[in-house]
Image: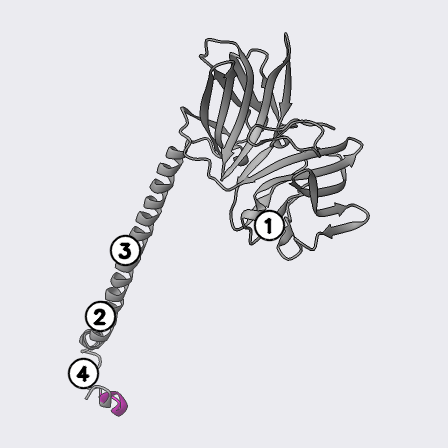
Amino acid sequence: MKIIIGLVFLHMIKTFELEEIVDTTLILRSTITLDCKYPGNETVIQIHWAKVNGSLEEVICTIHRSYGNYISPKYMSRLSYVVGNSSLDLSITLRETSKVDIGIYVCYVTVFPTGTMKKVIAVQGDDFGHILPSSHQVFKKNSKITLNFQNTLSGDVNKVIVQKFANGKMSLVTYCKNSKPGRKSLSYGFDFIKRSFVNCSDFQNVTLKIHQAAIMDEGIYQCHFWSDDKNQTISVNVHIQTTGLTSMSTFALICGVSSLVVLVIFIIAALCLVRTRKNRKIQAKQVNVSFNSTCPQLQIDTADKEPTYANFTPNSSFSKSWT
């Protein structure tokens, strides 16, 4: 299964049957993850990773459903498989990288009954530079992302490429070009094959739609238009909100709720303190009252009964308690 995949590194490699365009471009770091997630639901039989060296492909590792795993001795000490939430995550991680790791990598995925697909990844030493988007759009999670790119070129456009920039990675979304007079060819990047749709029938106005927006869809999307003598690039920053509020509203709400919680806690603590002090004063007052009321109560009782007990002689034990 032949797939034409993105425009970042254009290489003529003898091992490839066609002029290949790269799916994803990464910036070299001390640790890099070569991402390869199969977008379909078919059964994966084998995954094969290779690095292109001149006219040859150097084997990195192979994962087979029945025969197990193989890692080249050259990569054994610094390669690990990415443990994802799905068995369709076929990514690998390289540690302790250096300039020798710059180049082109290919992930071959053999599935039943589709056949073999491949994803081409380029690792480069230079950064992408600063990208300034011309507009900003917000979409709700699980909604449909719709982006319209309209160029202002005067000449006929013969090629359109849409790319996504996020987290130090550049991924191809789609590639449209005039293959024959009156006919256009359309190809999708490996990560967008199953979940996006591009209408490039009119090169003057290209529409991109992505189904069920997720956090991973955040980033800057660039649409490049090429004519015979000019080109134009349009950039849109896409943000995915997980609630019904915008990011600024969410931030303000969080700050407001936090302040309210702190205020409520302070008020409750103050009321508890005041109540505690009040209870202590009441208890102290009750003790004093109960103590001081003993003698008057006896005086009142004896006063009421004075005619009857005029000649009463107090018990000696009782008298001792009040001497």
235 on left or right of 92: left
Q: In the drawing, what numbered circle is on residue 281? A: none
Say whether disc 1 or disc 4 marks the residue closer to the N-terminus.
1
Say whether disc 4 or disc 3 marks the residue closer to the N-terminus.
3
Tag 4: residue type? Answer: Ala
Residue projecting furthest to the bottom: 316
Circle 1 residue: 94
Q: Where is residue 205 in the image (x, y as percent from the top left)?
A: 51, 13
Picture quarter with the C terminus: bottom left
Q: Give the range drawn in magenta.
A: 313-319
Q: Which residue is drawn at 49% across and 36% down?
A: 166
Say whether disc 1 or disc 3 marks the residue closer to the N-terminus.
1
Kindly indicate the quadrant of the structure image that contains residue 294. Answer: bottom left
271 on left or right of 240: left
| SS at badge 4 | loop
Q: How crowded is mark 1: few (under 14 residues within 10 Å), some or many (20 or more)?
A: some
Kindly indicate the quadrant of the structure image that contains residue 46. Answer: top right
Circle 4 residue: 310
27 on left or right of 274: right
Q: Position of residue 70 (x, y in %)?
A: 74, 51
Q: Residues within 10 Å of mark 4 (few under 14, many from 20)?
A: few
Say whether disc 2 or disc 3 marks the residue closer to the N-terminus.
3
Tag 3: residue type? Answer: Ala
Kindly indicate the quadrant of the structure image that contains residue 318. Answer: bottom left
The residues bearing labels 2 and 3 have C-alpha atoms spaced at a distance of 28 Å
Please say which color scheme the image uses.
Answer: one colour
185 on left or right of 207: right
Circle 2 residue: 289
State which mark lies toward you, 4 or 3.
Answer: 3
